[in-house]
Image (cartoon, helix red, strand yellow):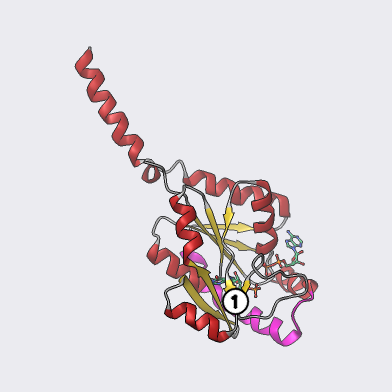
Amino acid sequence: MKKKGVLIVISGFSGVGKGTVVKKLVEKYDYRLSVSATTRAPRPGEIDGKDYHFKTVEEFENLIDYNGFIEWAQYVENYYGTPRKFVEEELEQGHNVILEIEVQGAMHIKEQYPDAVLIFITAPNALTLKERLEGRGTEDIKVIRKRLKRAYEETDDMSHYDYLVVNDDLDACVDEVHAVIQAENFKTSKNKDYITNIKEELAQIRKEI
Ligand code: ADP
Ligand code: 5GP
């Protein structure tokens, strides 16, 4: 039987750099990235179907009704959701799938997929986070305030994640996230078939000597 892929959830405060980290991770290693749906307006340069599936509120609510998402959440006045089909098919084919989603969605994933690996990406400190959010230059000060408020609230959920990785040096962060995911494959809980097989083999060998 083919081994199922690992479901990886990556969250982090707005502006921490998780989008940048995930992009590099996917370029460098063999991961499948889920493209979310959202009702937020595209940022300059964002492409429909690549960065997000951009939807109207009505389209998004229809997809909720038709069970089209494995999770969805409202974040600072917009809907965001993970399309079900892509994730289920890729995992079935044995691929490791990355979801870059916020904390409410991550908690829903943990309930449905107890084996998922939850990684929270954080900044060296709060000032760096604020500077990155401002430096990106894609949100006005009102939205930045709301996102920083949300970041404060999200600290309460950080301890529910399996791993915390600091995004200080970008390349180091990318490699650390990859190392964490790799370590998952060595967990005894992920190698139950191996244990069953070696036991059967040993039973056989004992009979033969
Ligand atoms: P998020 O997806 O978490 O909201 P982004 O990936 O859009 O964040 O990054 C926010 C800003 O921080 C961007 O301008 C990005 O270039 C910058 N950035 C990301 N990682 C680093 C890093 N390790 N050091 C300095 N700047 C970074
Ligand atoms: P942004 O507007 O900056 O692209 O994303 C805002 C927040 O929504 C980020 O924390 C991002 O991780 C999260 N997000 C993106 N896609 C999804 C999704 O499909 N589900 C959930 N729950 N959150 C998402």
Q: Position of residue 39 (x, y in %)?
A: 60, 81
Spot occupied by residue 28 in the image (x, y as percentages of width and height): 67, 47
Q: Secondary structure at mark 1?
A: strand
Disc 1 C-beta below 8 A from ligand 2: yes
Left or right: residue 136 compared with residue 6: right
In x, y percent, where is residue 74?
53, 81
On screen, 3 above or below 25? above
- In the image: residue 6, left or right of residue 139: left
Q: Quadrant of residue 88?
A: bottom left
Residue with the mark numbered 1 = 38
Q: Nearer the viewer, residue 124 or 193?
A: 193
Magenta stretch holds residue 156: yes
Magenta residues (range)? 137-160
At label 1, counting other C-alpha atoms closer than 10 Å, the crowd grade (few under 14, some 14-19, many 20 or more) is: many
Query: Which quarter of the rendered picture does the C terminus lie within?
Result: top left
Q: Is residue 183 above or below residue 149?
A: above
- Horizontal side of 118 relative to 41 (left or right) equals left
Which SS does the magenta portion mostly show? helix
Q: Is residue 157 visible?
A: no
Q: Is residue 112 visible?
A: yes
Residue 30 position, x and y percent, is 60, 46
* Amino acid carrying mark 1 in the image: Thr
Quarter of the rendered image showing ligand 1: bottom right
Say which of 26 and 49 sits in front: 49
Quadrant holding the N terminus: top left
Looking at the image, which residue is at 31% across and 29% down? 198
